[in-house]
Image (cartoon, rainbow, N blue to C red):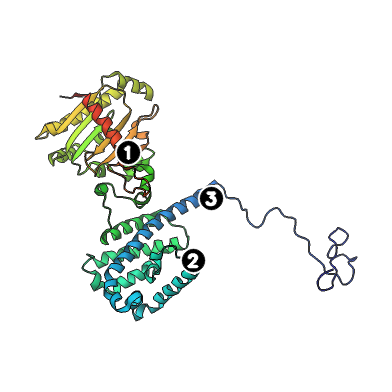
Amino acid sequence: MGSGGLELPPGDEGHEGNSADVPPGTVSLARPMETTSIGPELDWDADAWREVRTRAQRAGRAYIWLNLVEQRLRAVVAAVLRPIYEPVHGDEWVIAAAGPAGQEWVQRAVAVREVSRRKGYLLDPADDNVLSFLTLPQLRELMVQHWPCFEPYVDDRRDVELALDELEVTRNVVSRNRALSEAVLNQAERASARLLDALGAGGDVPSARRLPVDAVEDLVGDRYADVVAVHPDRVRLLRQFPAEDIFGGARRLDAVGIGLNLLVQNFSGRRLVRLAEAGCRVRLLFLNPASSAVKRRERELGMKRGELSRAVEMNILHMRRVRSRLRDPGAFEIQVYDETPRFSAYLVDGDGADGVAVVQSYLRRSRGMEAPVLVLRNGSRVVTSDEKNEGVDSALFPTYREEFETTWVDSRPVS
């Protein structure tokens, strides 16, 4: 019996909704459809999951850059405008700075702040102010309105505005969780780096001149010791980090390996001569082409007898020709070693805090071009944990530098 006094029919076969046997005064109930799915297919295949992860990774990187820019711009606005408006307007200095033109968006920020207070969303008392609730376009508006106040601290207004324009596309895409293309992400990362540099918050790591500090490295670099990049092979390394960027402008270059192809075949002899004449000291360690270790390596790689030896000899001869053109050949040292080769390492400015290293382990069945590549940054880690500062004890750079020095001592010079 239903709540309205109507009798509900039983759900057996003899009492269908359209049956003539249904007693008068009853309500007919439609049976659910016999179906095994609801609308379109709900399962995601491997391609769908791959696409979702790619979108999440790109959005995460973009968010980190946008967060850094917004925090820096908020700090700059506060440092410049607060001393002007706070003495007169107190806690409402942001409202006063917005002026009549910004009344609408500043009042919206005030309302969002009050809602956040009531719902307990303000987890840090330092964020309990109107400035913390302004968006990137609103912070930009404050800067533009008061540009004469910012002009002594920022070199070029046009550069700042252009960078913010480029970021606006990314900001809208990320805030609405839409697909972010790789090209737009790359543009946003470049614009963010330019903007942070213009606002006086560029990377303070010495090696940033050669290997720019990435935003993700800036935040989670302590998880990976001093490894700042990993490439599956040398081709992809050179695509992202060309030889000119690795070796150009070096003041010291130490390299150890079998044939040192990364340097010899990708950095011209003329450039090496100019580099050495500019004061760079070079030490190159080749595997002795006449050693038994070369023959073992040839067998591992399935090469013809003497093929690797001749390749190493050619590289050594090329470096000897470079050395012969220098006014100070003593600054360009070439030596050979006879030990089993375990890795190749190119240590650029390895004696200082601005050093960068490119390291590859030798695999039994893979040539150097095909082996994975690690890129290391010298010195202590970019970011260290507040709870535990392991410093350089967890770094890889000193390990390879020590291996180079030990091998150098046991090697023989090439005349």
Q: Of circles 2 and 3, which is in front?
A: 2
Q: Which mark is residue 48?
A: 3
Q: Residue at x 29, y 60 (%)?
A: 195
* Spot occupied by residue 109 in the image (x, y as percentages of width and height): 42, 72
Separation of marks 2 and 3 at Cα, in angstroms: 37 Å
* Earlier-in-chain disc, 2 versus 3: 3
Viewer-side residue, 31 vs 224: 224
* Spot occupied by residue 308 in the image (x, y as percentages of width and height): 30, 24
Element assignment for label 1: helix
Viewer-side residue, 124 vs 294: 124
Q: Residue at x 14, y 34 (%)?
A: 331
* Earlier-in-chain disc, 2 versus 1: 2
Residue extending furthest toward the left: 327
Q: Residue at x 37, y 34 (%)?
A: 370
Judge from the rendering whether residue 270 lies leftward or rightward of residue 257; answer left or right: left
Q: Which residue is mark 2?
A: 120
Q: Please tell me whether residue 186 is drawn above or below residue 248 in the rendered image.
A: below
Q: Please tell me whether residue 314 is drawn above or below residue 125 in the rendered image.
A: above
Q: Of circles 3 and 1, which is in front?
A: 1
Among the 4 quarters of the image, the one containing residue 65: bottom left
Q: Disc 3 marks which amino acid?
A: Ala
Judge from the rendering whether residue 46 lies leftward or rightward of residue 330; answer left or right: right
- Quadrant of the frame with the N terminus: bottom right
Q: Residue at x 78, y 61 (%)?
A: 31
